[in-house]
Amino acid sequence: MKIYRRLIIPLLVTICLVIAKLYFKEESSSWEGIWSWLPHMNTILIISGFAWCLLAFTGILKIIFLKQYDISKEDNLRARKIYTQLNILQKIANFIIIILGIGLILISFEPIRKIGVGVFASAGVAGIIIGFSAQKAIGALIAGIQIAFAQPFRLDDAVVVEGEWGWIEEINLTYVVVRIWDQRRLVLPTTYFLENPFQNWTRTSADIIGSVFLYTDYIVPFDELRKELDRILENTSLWDKKTKILQVTDAKEGTVESRILVSARNSPTAWDLRVHVREKMIEFLQKNYPQSLPRTRIILEGEVKS
């Protein structure tokens, strides 16, 4: 019942305004001078009240639908999909309600209603002018609607945008807010995501594979590294027990590159797991195989004769 309370106040206010409108209609002859504006002001307030009720109603509908989905679960892909769609659809509905309310208020003025005939007559020219002047704003609105249904990303998706790694925090009709890992906020227009490439790490599932690179000398024992990786993963709750791989991915002039792949249940946990594995593997090399750390060799040939 708590969610319906937000509708009670606008509904009661609107009912009172409608009752007052009936009173104004019956006593219209007695209103003179400055008080003659009261009936028209009451009409404006009634329109605003109905718009207020509709805005509250869309919010209640969204809450009712979203109560069936828990976005806090680990496997929350479907919940995030529904949250994204309903949030944008509510914003679209609210935008239409507000525009219609403003339009009805303007039409209630007699002078504007008369001018409206001329406005409709020149609607073609006005439409072209408005289209050119507001094409970016209209494009952003259309992009927001497209994101709601195509869903290249959803709320709480882990993304890499403009070289920054973070999570989708807000999706609005004209802009998107990305929460960067260090708590900064990156605000981008919705059109950006339709015109530029970006990485979405949780597009199909919440679990993710993280990579750790080690650079060592050629004499490093790879079998011992794999055994140590097994031990590290078995003793941490960050690993989801799905993926663990250590491969030699490159051999350069002075070092060997080893890549470790480990999986976690979500992107924040994957970050913590990567940091943990990197630290423990370096400690292992320092204590047991210090000679395997990167080094520079210089070979001196011949003897110096005095």
Image (cartoon, rainbow, N blue to C red):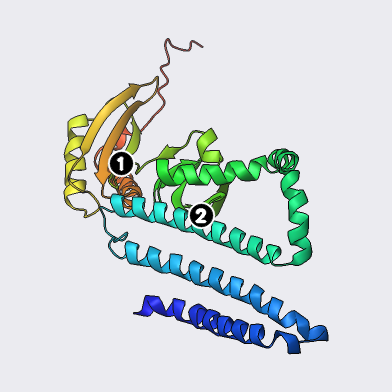
Residue 123 against residue 94 in the figure, above or below: above
Q: Give 75 or 292, whichever is nearer the viewer.
A: 75
Q: Residues within 10 Å of mark 2 (few under 14, many from 20)?
A: some
Label 2 sits on residue = 92
Q: Quadrant of residue 249?
A: top left
* Residue drawn at (39%, 63%) of the image: 62
Closer to the camera, 290 or 24? 24
Give residue 191's quadrant in the image: top right
Mark positioned earlier in the residue sequence (1 or 2): 2
Question: Amino acid type of disc 1?
Answer: Thr
Mark linked to residue 232 = none
Q: Which residue is mark 1?
A: 204
Q: Are dots 1 and 2 in contact, CB under 8 Å?
A: no
- Compared across the picture, whether 85 is left or right of 223 comes to right
Q: 215 or 203: nearer the eye?
A: 203
45 on left or right of 244 = right
Tell me the quadrant of the picture where the N terminus can be found: bottom left
Label 1 vs label 2, nearer the camera = 2
- Using the numbered discs, state the Cα–Cα distance from disc 1 to disc 2 in whole angstroms: 26 Å
| Mark 1 residue element | loop
Q: Position of residue 250 (x, y in %)?
A: 34, 23
Left or right of 218? Residue 148 is right
What residue is at 42 percent from the left and 20 percent from the top? 298
Q: Position of residue 91 (x, y in %)?
A: 50, 57
The crowd level at tag 1 (other Cα within 10 Å; few <14, some 14-19, many 20+) is few
Q: Residue at x 69, y 43 (%)?
A: 134
Report the front residue among 138 and 264: 138
155 shown above or below 135: below
Residue 70: x and y in percent read 29, 61
Residue 53 can be seen, yes or no: yes
Where does the image place residue 258, in percent across and percent down from the top left?
Answer: 30, 30
Q: Is residue 183 visible?
A: no
